[in-house]
Structures are given as structure tokens and as C-alpha cells.
Image (cartoon, rainbow, N blue to C red):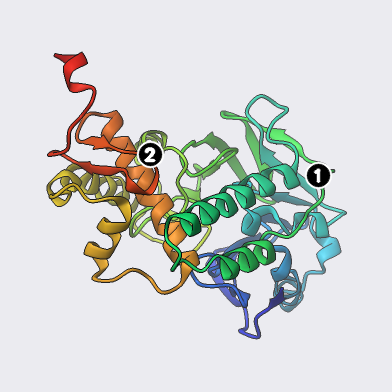
Amino acid sequence: MTPTDTPQTVEKITEGLLRIELPPVAGICEALSTSTNVYLVEHPSPALINAGHPAQFDHLVRALRGCGISPADIERIIATSWQIDVVGAAPQFPGADLFVLSPDMRTPRDLEMQVDARRQRLLQLGGRMADFDDRFRRQPVEEQIEDYYPRLTRDLRFAPLRNGHFVKAGSLRLEVMGTAGPGAGHMALYEEERKLLFCGDFTMTHLPRFLEDTRAYLVSLERLAQLESKRVLPNRGRVFTQGRWTVTRAANFLNNFLGNAPAALVRSPSVLEFIERDRGHLPEDPVELLLLYERFQLLFDELVRSRAIAAAGDGFERRYGVDVDDPRGKIRG
């Protein structure tokens, strides 16, 4: 695993706040690795919001030095999630205090445990898909996942945060908002004076990239939409200047997708059939296919949970729609 030769980008957001956009990890497909944002708070006590992927560390160091800051000058890092491209490079700043969300003040606490949980979920899903369809290429999936999720430290020293805390990052006083949905230990950070919302792994322009709990994701988005934010600063992609409107639009987009999905599930497709129908073909990249399957399965299972649709069958043959036999029908009467 090596960093790409693409240069990092540095953008001034407001006085004393810069966005450093780190390029994707080389050799990893776009579905798994994208450009990542690290936010530098310039101050006599410099701070970072997020730290990037371990393979992006050299790019981050060059960007910091271009801003006149040595990595040794960084006094604290606040990581908005436990994703590897958010917190993975933090151990390479041994002089910085690390702050992450740990709701019960104990867990999540082990970085390798968090990374391995994600690694194993994808490997197991890839194995099951290969058993289901012998055309699915298992080897490139395993190679990319093992490369993108390297073994990391189990001894991650950090200060635990929980919902309602306030934490300082240079001149910023940030309110911690535990926001479930994208993943365990996810949080948003809100700076009321400047109306800045660091929204973490929430996606602002399309379907969620990271999703573990659809219902919690929507509830968290709607909570963030109540803030009077002027700028929204995501972990990936550009900064949005119409803050509250942007978050409201993201919540409406996901709500509309869930509301309209039943009409699209005619003839009760499986998830793989839906993807092929929606895109006109199945993705050639097996990792992209795996991630799409995982995402749509979570979304469709939420529709089943809310009884907007029914489902029948198991595994990759499970079919979703309003016109499938629902074994719960007789029970509900």
C-alpha cells in the first residue's frame, strides 16, 4: 500500500481554519478509497480535526509543512469517526492528544478491533457472494481489503468524548454531538460562534457512503438540520456554504429515496437484480459491487422493518417488494 503521487490540496475556509484534501490511497478502487479531508486549526496550539489514512500520512506532513507547521507542533487531534481514513494516521502523531467519541467512556477503544470488524465483515460478505455466484472474483476483493485495512495498534491512547461534551481545537470550541448511523463511535462537531458544522461521515449529495443503521442515520441527520449552521465540513468532498439547507436537503434526499423505493421494487427483485436494473449492468469492480450490495441491503431491510415493503427468502436470493409473499401476513391478520 503506497500513497498516490497526486498532490494534496489546501483550502482556506475561514480565518485560522484550513481544509487539507488528501488524495486516495494508490492501488485501491474508488469505491473503497476516496480523497479525505483533514482540517487544520491554525493557532499557537495547532489542532487537527481528523488525521487521514495511515498511507496518507506523508501527504499530510507535506501539507502541514507547507503551512509552516511541523507534525510535532500538533497538540491535539479530534477524530469524528473510527473509520480508518479518519483516525488511522493518528498514532503517527505521538505528541498529540487524541479525542474520539466513546459513548460509555470505554468502547470503542481498540483501533485494531474496530478496523478488524470492518475488515472481517467485508471478507465474509465477499466469501458468501463468491459461493453464491462463481463469476464473482474473490481474490481482488481480499487483496484490496487486506491492503486498505492494514493491522493497526491495539494500544490507542485517547481521551474519550461523549454526547454533550465540549472540546477545544485551537480557537474553536466544539460541541460534541453523538450521531449514530454512519458507524459506531461517530460524532459531529458544532462551533456555534462561527456556525461551523463538521458533519463527519454523513453524505450530503447522494446515498450514504457509510451506513450501519438507516433509522439512526436519518434521526441524526434531522437533528443536525436543526442547527443554524452556515458551513458544513464533511470528511470527504467539498465544503458546503449553505449549511442548514444542505443538511436538510440530504435528509430529504434519503427520505425521498426510502419513500419512492417501494415503487421501484416491482417484480420483487433481489438486491443484485435491483443494482443491475438501476445501473443497467452490474459493476465490473467486485469491491464496488460488494459495497453497493451492503448499502442497498441495509436500506431495503429498513423498509421491511417499517413494513413499507415485504421480503421473502434469505441471503442473496432474498427478494424485496410489495408483491412478495410476506410470511408475517397471517400473523398480523
In front of the other: 76 or 209: 209
Coordinates of residue 252 in the picture (x, y in percent):
25, 46
Mark 1, other Cα within 10 Å: few <14 / some 14–19 / many ≥20: some
Asked whether the viewer can see residue 80, the reply is: no
Amino acid at the residue labelled 2: Thr
Question: In this picture, is 191 found above or below 37?
Answer: above
Mark 2, other Cα within 10 Å: few <14 / some 14–19 / many ≥20: many
- Residue at x 45%, y 58% (from the top left corner): 291
- Identify residue for label 2: 214
Between circles 2 and 1, the one closer to the viewer is 2
Secondary structure beneath dot 2 equals helix
Coordinates of residue 191 in the picture (x, y in percent):
53, 44
Question: In this picture, is 72 found above or below 281?
Answer: above
Q: CA distance from mark 2 to mark 1?
A: 29 Å
- Identify residue for label 1: 156
In front of the other: 176 or 289: 289
Coordinates of residue 154 in the picture (x, y in percent):
82, 44
- Residue at x 28%, y 71% (from the top left corner): 281
Asked whether the viewer can see residue 85, the reply is: yes
